[in-house]
Image (cartoon, helix red, strand yellow):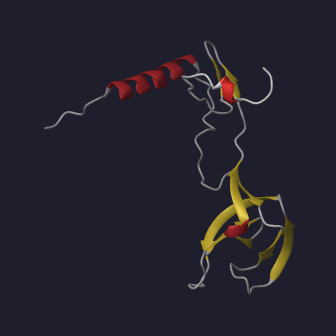
Amino acid sequence: MSRAVLSRRDFLKLSGYGLMGMLCPNLPMKFLQQDDFDNLQGRVVDRTIWEYDEPDFKAKRLKLYWHDLILPITNTTISEDEAAYNRVWYQVGEGGYVYSGSVQPVRTIWMISITCRAASLTAPYGSMTNRTSRPNVSSCTGTI
């Protein structure tokens, strides 16, 4: 019979979860996303695109969308045209379809701040870089 090995990393994770559970018992679990398409949107990257009633360019056109418009994506589907280079289509709104090559999928994630008895939890903004050396000042143009 083999014994389950608990690594140091797993131990620290489980200890942290237990500590957060004790200190913040009313912490909402909204960050556990249920659906892949929950809060998924698409940004139109072409100048204009059409919404069709079926995932096919020969289908009936429903609406015209313009550049940088944000659309709610509710599902994805594959077209029946096997000769097409990209067969993926997004279902938007109440059932229309837009071609996925013209839409950039984006997800809006709101920054939350939760305060409990012993801690304040905020979602980070941006990314960190580790720069060990200073930039070469002599290569800069202009005066410093």
Tell me the quarter of the image containing the C terminus: top right
**48 is higher (above) or lower (below) than 114:** below
The residue located at (47%, 22%) in the rendering is: 16
Give percent across and percent down for residue 125.
69, 31
Indicate the quadrant where residue 37 lies.
Answer: bottom right
Give percent across and percent down for residue 83.
57, 85
Give percent across and percent down for residue 106.
70, 52
Give percent across and percent down for residue 75.
65, 64
The residue located at (63%, 26%) in the rendering is: 136
Quick check: 17 left or right of 49? left
**22 is higher (above) or lower (below) than 34:** above
Quick check: 69 left or right of 90? right
In-front residue for pair 66/27: 66
In-front residue for pair 107/20: 107
Q: How many marks?
A: 0
In-front residue for pair 29/53: 53
In-front residue for pair 100/96: 100
Question: Hey, which residue is sitting farthest left in the picture?
Answer: 1
Indicate the quadrant where residue 60 lies.
Answer: bottom right
Tell me the quarter of the image containing the N terminus: top left
Indicate the quadrant where residue 68 lies.
Answer: bottom right
The residue located at (68%, 68%) in the rendering is: 101
